[in-house]
Amino acid sequence: MCGRAACTLCPDDIQKACGYKAPNSGKKFQKPKWNEGNGYNQYKPSHNIAPTEVLPVLVSGSQVNDESERVIQPMIWGMIPPWHKGDPKTHGLTTHNCRLEHMLSSKLYSPPFSKGLRCVVVCDGFYEWQTTKGSKNKQPYFIYRPQPEGVEIESATTWTTDWSDSEGWKGPQLLKMAGLFQIFKTTDGEEIYSCTVITMESNETLSWLHHRTPAVLESDEQVSDWLDAGNVPSKKALHLITPPKTLSWHPVSTLVNNSRNKDEECNKRISLSTPPVKRSASGCFMDSWLKKGSPTKKSTDDTSQDEKRAKH
């Protein structure tokens, strides 16, 4: 699963980090347009982002009525059901993750998928917790893309923010996860963007840590095809969803357990007395602030799955 993330870059640097080569641009890189969010969709860099908070999301401009080829649209993490009435944050369902196995049969996720409302959720990395045998305590880890030599994703002092249209982004490599999005309209006609991250069974890369993993898009070609609903139909897009093969991680402090803790120490590497099965690189950095934690919610899809399990 994926229930907590860090995204510490400012909007301008996120645009640089999401730079891409357009089909007709030759060898030049270009940055996606940044769409400033409204009151519900305002992005703030944070070391500890929980569901119902806002993440930067990459979409095709054609899906959001924009002439730009690609757009970064800040979205609420957790899809708002279109049938919900009232405050968009009070629907009471856990919708920040969409199980791939149930996506095509879900009344919430199947419609946006069939309409091509595919997106790429962008972040420094996400947190996952490992249960320690014989203990009720869980050890949190920070998971992210492998970084260039000398770059530690949790330490901004090791970064550069250099970018050029000939060479692209030279800073930390961001994690890009396949997702779906929805546009919810309030009774006042205000449009609110919300998204979900697609998850699946883990492979050997992360199964030592958790049995579920987000669908990470590991190549620029995968990102391009996932966003291109006009030329890559839904059936073909499903083949892009595979468990990640190349990830890095390190253990972090239990500070991250409380979503109200936005301290920059949340994704800093710590030492463990007993090494985990696997070890790897680093984490992230930027300003932090305090917010209320998100209430625990129950998903309609997860509920039905729990009911099925209970019968066997």
Image (cartoon, grey):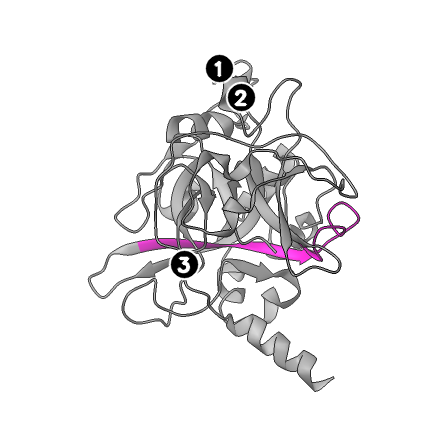
Could you tell whether 112 is left or right of 248 in the image? left
x 47%, y 29%: residue: 285
Q: Is residue 119 visible?
A: no
Find out whether residue 214 is within the magenta segment. Answer: no
x 67%, y 35%: residue: 271
- The numbered disc on residue 67 is none
- The numbered disc on residue 294 is 3
Mark 1 is on which residue type? Asp
x 49%, y 40%: residue: 6
Q: Judging from the image, what secondary structure is the residue with disc 3 in?
A: loop
Q: Is residue 70 visible?
A: yes
Mark 2 is on which residue type? Gly
The quadrant of the image that shows the C terminus is bottom right
Which residue is under mark 2?
171
Q: Judging from the image, what secondary structure is the residue with disc 2 in?
A: loop
User: Real-space Cα distance between discs 2 and 1?
Assistant: 7 Å
x 74%, y 36%: residue: 279
Question: In the rendered image, which quarter is residue 26 located in?
Answer: top right
| Sequence-first disc among 2 and 3 | 2
Query: Bounds of the magenta span?
Result: 192-212
Disc number lying in front (2 or 3):
3
| Sequence-first disc among 1 and 3 | 1
